[in-house]
Image (cartoon, rainbow, N blue to C red):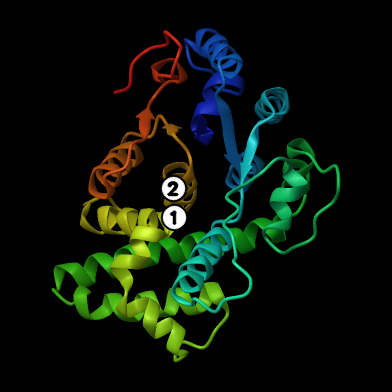
């Protein structure tokens, strides 16, 4: 089983401030790993930890990550692009090369390669955090994108309230698909994806999860902030290709439960590692 751990969980177990039950949670984490659980993290953990001003928190958090040797969720844009290419290939019986979706990497270096940027063989989580902490310009670029996410939530909510979302949605989907695939929005293949959106969502897990989270956030009354952008990235990887998601974020957890019910998929969404149920283990219960 693949279990995605939210940033706040790693802070609570191995960083600062630690949870009162951190030792018990760490023990469960180790036990579950021996029982077959694979922990999953992503580049968003690197970004969030790099924003910490507490050196001890950074050091202890990094030590925990290096010790648990997680899988790494690949770039969500790359995963969604591969999903779309696979869908289009399934429609084209003459396709000579069948693409495949690669949601995970074994190492940080392989994960960075999915972002089509510079990657160094042997790179580590600790090194990547250090690079981002020492490079404010890199963080500024990520933060600008985060602000756009908050604005998009507000725009989508306004469209729903005005009753114009059904008109706006095909345009938004076409723009997203064109951006992911690097094609012109007028490309006939983009239009085919838009007109077959129900089939796309059925066959493309991460795109379906993204749509579900977008709808849940659009209907919710919470005030969108830049800090919600990392939450979306965590949840997209956690719900689309993992079996469980451990997060202490009440609002995010509730949105994830709504999406899971809407899509009819089975995912454990819990607040503590000890709440996970791993087949063959006598460990806790889901909430």
Label 1 with label 2: CB-CB less than 8 Å:
yes
For the residue carrying disc 1, how many other residues have a C-alpha within 10 Å: few (<14), some (14-19), or many (20+)?
Answer: many
Residue at horizontal 64 percent and vertical 37 percent from the top = 71
Residue at horizontal 32 percent and vertical 34 percent from the top = 250
| Residue 48 image label | none
For the residue carrying disc 2, how many other residues have a C-alpha within 10 Å: few (<14), some (14-19), or many (20+)?
Answer: many
Residue identified by numbered label 2:
240
Residue at horizontal 29 percent and vertical 67 percent from the top = 198
Left or right: residue 257 versus residue 97 is: left
Which element type, helix, strand or loop, lies under badge 1? Answer: helix
Residue identified by numbered label 1:
206
Residue at horizontal 18 percent and vertical 77 percent from the top = 164
**Image vertical order of residue 199 relative to residue 109, above or below:** below
Q: Which of the 4 image quadrants contains residue 282?
A: top left
Which element type, helix, strand or loop, lies under badge 2? Answer: helix
Left or right: residue 239 versus residue 82 is: left
**Image vertical order of residue 186 relative to residue 284, above or below:** below
| Most foreground residue, 50 or 172 | 172
| Most foreground residue, 253 or 121 | 121
**Where residue 259 sits: x, y (%)?**
29, 47
Label 1 vs label 2: CA separation? 5 Å
Q: Quadrant of the C terminus?
A: top left
**Where residue 9 sits: x, y (%)?**
50, 27
Q: Give the mark nearer the N terminus: 1 vs 2.
A: 1
**Image vertical order of residue 194 relative to residue 269, above or below:** below
Task: Specify the farthest residue to the bottom.
Answer: 186
**Image vertical order of residue 282 relative to residue 13, above or below:** above
């Amino acid at each position: 089983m693949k279990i995605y751990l939210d940033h706040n969980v790693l802070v609570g177990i191995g960083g600062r401030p630690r949870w009162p039950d951190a030792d018990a949670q760490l023990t469960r984490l180790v036990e579950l790993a021996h029982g077959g659980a694979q922990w999953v993290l992503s580049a968003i953990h690197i970004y969030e930890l790099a924003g910490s001003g507490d050196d001890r928190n950074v050091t202890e958090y990094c030590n925990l990550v290096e010790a648990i040797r997680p899988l790494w969720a690949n770039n969500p844009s790359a995963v969604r692009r591969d999903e779309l290419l696979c869908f289009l290939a399934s429609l084209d019986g003459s396709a000579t090369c069948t693409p495949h979706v690669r949601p995970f990497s074994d190492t940080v270096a392989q994960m960075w390669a999915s972002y089509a940027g510079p990657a160094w063989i042997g790179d580590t989580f600790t090194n990547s955090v250090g690079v981002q902490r020492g490079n404010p310009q890199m963080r500024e670029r990520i933060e600008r994108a985060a602000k756009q996410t908050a604005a998009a939530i507000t725009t989508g909510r306004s469209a729903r309230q005005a009753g114009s979302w059904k008109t706006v949605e095909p345009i938004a989907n076409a723009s997203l698909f064109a951006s992911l695939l690097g094609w012109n929005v007028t490309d006939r293949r983009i239009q085919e994806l838009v007109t077959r959106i129900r089939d796309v969502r059925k066959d493309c897990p991460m795109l379906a999860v993204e749509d579900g989270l977008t709808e849940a956030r659009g209907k919710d009354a919470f005030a969108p902030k830049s800090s919600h952008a990392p939450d979306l990235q965590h949840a997209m990887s956690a719900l689309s290709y993992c079996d469980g998601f451990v997060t202490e974020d009440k609002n995010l957890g509730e949105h994830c439960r709504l999406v899971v019910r809407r899509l009819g998929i089975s995912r454990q969404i819990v607040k503590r590692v000890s709440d996970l149920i791993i087949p063959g283990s006598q460990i806790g219960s889901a909430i």
